[in-house]
Amino acid sequence: MADHVVDTNVLIVASAAVEPKYTDVNVDANGIDVVCSWLTRFRDDAARRLVIDEVWEIYKEYNHKLNAQHFGLQVVHHKLQACLRTEPVEYDGNGYGVVPAALADMDNSDKKFVAAALNDPANIEIVYAVDRGWKRNHAALQAHSVVVVGLLS
């Protein structure tokens, strides 16, 4: 079973299912249920670790979008205590994760996720809910052996 870098949009979409609901979500009820169900299974499986970077920039992004009352961030807090995996990520002068040139077109905010996964692509998957950038860059990510799982693709 792989460890997971979880895109912030997974946490946001799942948080639209549980009170207090995250309200700025453009996903239908069925999609919200799919993402919430995945995140619940992830939370409950101690063998599946949450992957963040060693300086916690990924965690900081989660906190910019969610608060401690949201289900998505509660799952993160559970994983931080129960089964966390940190990976080194190099950041450039603008604060973006450093990735190979072939992945330079990635959304800047996603580069830290990719950089973390590149440390062990055989055992780390990136999971997202809604983000066309992951699909657009699928071939380049695959060329670097990065597995990206779209929950609503």
Image (cartoon, rainbow, N blue to C red):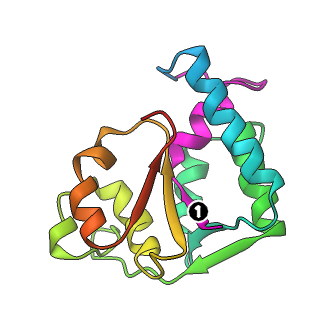
Can you say whether 6 is above or below 41 in the image?
below
* Quadrant assignment for the C terminus: top left
Q: Is residue 117 left or right of residue 41?
A: left
Apparent side of residue 15 relative to residue 90 in the rendered image (left or right): right
Compared to 107, does 37 lie above or below? above
Q: Is 111 located above or below residue 107 in the figure?
A: below
**Residue at the spot x=76%, y=25% of the render?**
20
All told, the count of numbered labels is 1
Instruction: Write down the region rendered in magenta.
Output: 1-24
Seen from the viewer's position, the closer of residues 19 and 102 is 102
In x, y percent, where is residue 52? 58, 69
Report x, y in % for residue 82: 84, 68
Location of residue 13 with respect to 9 vertically, above or below: above
Q: Nearer the viewer, residue 76 or 64?
A: 76
**Residue assigned mark 1:** 4
Q: Residue at x 51, y 41 (%)?
A: 9
Q: Is residue 133 magenta?
A: no
Residue 34, percent from left and from top: 63, 30
Quadrant of the rendered image containing residue 49: bottom right
Q: Quadrant of residue 29?
A: top right
Q: What residue is shown at x 72% (from left), y 52% (from top)?
A: 42
Look at the image and tell me whether residue 13 can be seen. Answer: yes
Q: Residue 4 or 143: which is nearer the viewer? A: 143
> Does 105 sit left or right of 131 as displayed?
left
